[in-house]
Amino acid sequence: MTHLPKACLLHLIAAQAALGAANQTYVPREILVRASPGRDDAARAAIENLRLTILETDAFSGVMRVRTNGDDDREDHYLEALNDLPEIAYAERNGIGHVGEIPNDTFFGLQWHLHNTGQSGGTPGADIQCVDAWDVFTGSSLIGVAVLDTGIQFNHPDLVGRIAANGWDFVNEDSDPAADHGHGTWVSGCIAANANNRFAVAGVDWACQIVPIKVVDQNGFGTTFDLAEALNYAASQANVHIVSMSLINYPNDSTLIDALQNARDAGKILIACAGNGGIGNADVSFPGASNLTMSIGFTTRQDLRHSNSATGNALDFVAPGTAIVTLAHGTSADTFATFTGCSFATPITSGVAALLLGAAQEAGVTLTHDDVYQLLQAGAEDQVGPASQDTPGWDAFFGHGRVNAYLSLLALPPACPADINLDEQVNVNDMLELISQWGQCPTGCTADIFPKGGSGAVDINDLLALIADWGPCP
């Protein structure tokens, strides 16, 4: 990604590393040890001299699982002692992993777009890989998504705490965007339904705020003027970062284009439906057809393009949009509703964008519309559909590919690990920081950089890593 300043990227990766470290756990009093080449016997003797017990050895790699004796839980002490010996290639804790984050929402198992296991004849993996994405990041309440739609059901149990106070109704010209049609609640559920609450369904983002802006009436129709007003309003709201528009068939009018441009100029990220009219519809259905928005088509649970999904030069990405399980409108019951169309692929993509913005914002980085586009493109899965349509690279049927939340989060670029002060280079300031923390490393110690994830102490290995990266930070 080229739009982010390098210093911002360094802060971003530091925050990601801290997040990963906070979630990492280890087997108590266990260490994994690998001997230096040809030094197996010497390594075993060194382990025994430290009064450690070898529990088992991997026959393929020779890595030994070693346990401290009794109640001795000084893993840091033993790690440093072992890593200082020439007969030891490395010593590290025995980490504990886990399955991906599976929310306990009642009907999560039906939400194939989040986690496709082949349910109802689907193709496993034909989803946006949310279970893995949630292991990286689940969302931030500092991110706001303006949903330009029919309003929202304010008292829905699965939206408690997720609706911002500055919504607006441009149909009735008042400050109460309560829904008189279910569409706005349905699409908002795709983005932000409360997850892991043993109720209903899960949204893509577990923490973002929805700013409901009503632009469509109870019959499902809206005007260019109301949509333009809504865009200009969203552009003026500091808590709006993303504008999600599950809207189709508006005309290519100057009033609309000027409003879209105003929102882009205000730094908003614009995501819209490609259309439900099939072949060629992506180029004529606005606001999605505008080059100021990201245009989203929709796929099935088998990674096929739905026959109604719009195609054309304006298409940017596709996302799941067939038989999408989301919130039911007009009820407080523990139930769900199912719908098909680009109206649902669009908020799913908006939810992914919210995850990306949240992960970046926590590190003090602001992503632009183009930055998010590049991250979605970097993570999009290409050639998942029929070879005749989903050709390598961009095509008019699948755009850049199917959105993937996990791969887009991973596309946030890495930074030089030895640049402890995050000043874009490894220099004397990093050396001074390392020296100041030499020895036992407190929680969150930035100078404990080697091996990956840190050894628990600032030691010779960190000095060697710093020296290896000395100079401009790649």
Image: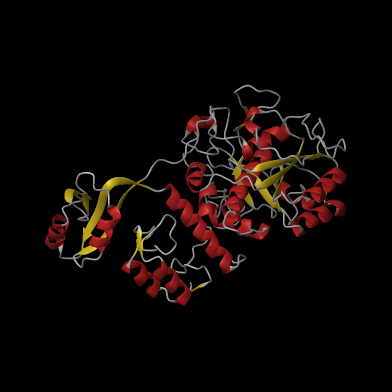
Residue 351, x across and y down, in percent: 62, 44
Does residue 240 lie above or below 49 as drawn? above
Name the one closer to the observer, 352 or 464.
464
> Can residue 398 be spotted in the picture?
no
Residue 328, x across and y down, in percent: 66, 27
Residue located at (50% from left, 60% from top): 14
Residue located at (37% from left, 45% from top): 97
Does residue 333 lie above or below 96 as drawn? above
> Extreme front residue here?
436
Which of the 4 image quadrants contains residue 433?
Answer: bottom left
Residue 44, x across and y down, in percent: 14, 57
Position of 152 with respect to 128 (left or right) is right
> Can residue 285 be spotted in the picture?
yes
Residue 77, x across and y down, in percent: 27, 57
Total marks in image: 0
Position of 41 with respect to 220 (left or right) is left
Does residue 412 lie above or below 28 as drawn? below
Residue located at (82% from left, 33% from top): 217
Which of the 4 image quadrants contains residue 324?
Answer: top right
Q: How is the image coloured?
A: secondary structure
Name the one closer to the observer, 325 or 412.
412
Instruction: Locate the N terminus by quadrant.
Output: bottom right
Residue located at (28% from left, 53% from top): 75
Name the one closer to the observer, 33 or 353.
33
